[in-house]
């Protein structure tokens, strides 16, 4: 039954996966194409003149020389600053596991079928996890095309590593959203809790980065964005 739920859910999801993948891949492509037109070293020199609190505010750590490489610029400029946008997809998909169907009254009919609730949850979760892998893979393809078109020297292995590290973050958010939506059982409340969690995590990480060596830095460890 898990297999049947997985297949049916994926059939309903693949178009959204394609749309999101194309959109995010296009943005990644544009960021890579920007690299040859920028004087990255001049940007690093400018950042060196800024106080640490400002660097933390814009999401740049103390090792500014990382930004002097194309890989560092892309990792910081795209994967770092796009973290909130990346978070939207697993939240939307997580709400579809139970909350949307429960809110529309469809869930009762689904659970009247000869299957256990956990089979439905596992089947849908696996389908949306595969869709996350699909979206992330499309981001990689878009950025790979950017590297090929621009002709810049770029360590694709580092790009693969960053892409792989993105997956557990998105799957974690998918699981967290599913948990809250199943626990609360009200779509609007569940969405509000998950949104507050994501935004609060982003703020905590930002504040922690701005105040290195203080108690605020320790508070920033509560944010999952810190580990991402």
Image: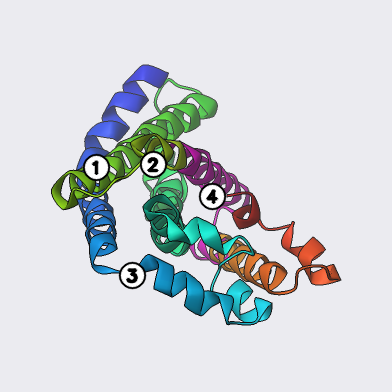
SS state under label 2: helix
SS state under label 1: helix
Of the image marks 1 and 3, the number of the one nearer the N terminus: 3
**Pointer 1 residue:** 144
Let me know if residue 88 appears in the view: no
Q: Where residue 185 sits in the image (x, y, percent)?
A: 56, 52
User: Label 1, label 3: how many angstroms apart (C-alpha)?
Assistant: 21 Å
**Left or right placement of residue 220 versus residue 86 in this view:** right
- Which-is-in-front pick, marks 4 and 3? 3
Quarter of the figure with the N terminus: top left
**Pointer 3 residue:** 39
Q: Where residue 12 sits in the image (x, y, percent)?
A: 24, 39
Tell me the residue at 43%/49% (across/down): 90
Of the image marks 2 and 3, the number of the one nearer the N terminus: 3
Of the image marks 4 and 3, the number of the one nearer the N terminus: 3
State the predominant SS element of the stretch in magenta.
helix
**Pointer 4 residue:** 177
SS state under label 4: helix
- Which-is-in-front pick, marks 4 and 1? 1
- Structural crowding at the residue carrying mark 3, measured as other residues with C-alpha within 10 Å and reported as few (<14), some (14–19) or many (≥20): few
> Is 39 drawn above or below residue 68 in the view shown?
below
- Structural crowding at the residue carrying mark 4, measured as other residues with C-alpha within 10 Å and reported as few (<14), some (14–19) or many (≥20): many
Residue 133, quarter of picture:
top left
User: Label 4, label 3: how many angstroms apart (C-alpha)?
Assistant: 41 Å
For the residue pair 182 and 22, the one nearer the viewer reads as 22
Q: Where residue 45 sits in the image (x, y, percent)?
A: 49, 74
Cβ atoms under marks 1 and 2 closer than 8 Å: yes
Tell me the residue at 45%/21% (across/down): 115
Residues shaded magenta: 164-192
**Pointer 2 residue:** 159
């Amino acid at each position: 039954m898990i297999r049947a739920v997985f297949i049916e859910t994926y059939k309903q999801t693949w178009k959204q996966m394609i749309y999101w993948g194309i959109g995010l891949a296009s943005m990644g492509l544009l960021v890579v194409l920007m690299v040859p037109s920028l004087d990255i070293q001049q940007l690093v020199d400018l950042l060196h003149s800024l106080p640490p609190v400002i660097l933390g505010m814009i999401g740049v750590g103390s090792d500014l020389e990382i930004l002097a490489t194309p890989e560092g610029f892309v990792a910081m400029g795209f994967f770092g600053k796009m973290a909130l946008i990346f978070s939207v997809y697993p939240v939307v998909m997580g709400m579809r596991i139970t909350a949307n169907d429960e809110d529309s009254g469809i869930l009762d009919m689904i659970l009247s079928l000869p299957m256990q609730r956990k089979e439905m949850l596992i089947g849908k979760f696996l389908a949306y996890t595969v869709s996350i892998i699909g979206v992330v893979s499309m981001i990689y393809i878009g950025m790979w095309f950017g590297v090929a078109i621009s002709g810049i020297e770029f360590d694709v292995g580092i790009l693969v590593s960053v892409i792989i590290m993105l997956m557990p973050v998105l799957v974690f958010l998918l699981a967290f959203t599913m948990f809250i939506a199943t626990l609360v059982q009200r779509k609007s409340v569940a969405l509000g809790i998950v949104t507050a969690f994501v935004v609060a995590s982003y703020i905590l990480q930002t504040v922690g980065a701005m105040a290195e060596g203080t108690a605020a830095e320790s508070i920033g460890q509560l944010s999952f964005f810190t580990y991402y």
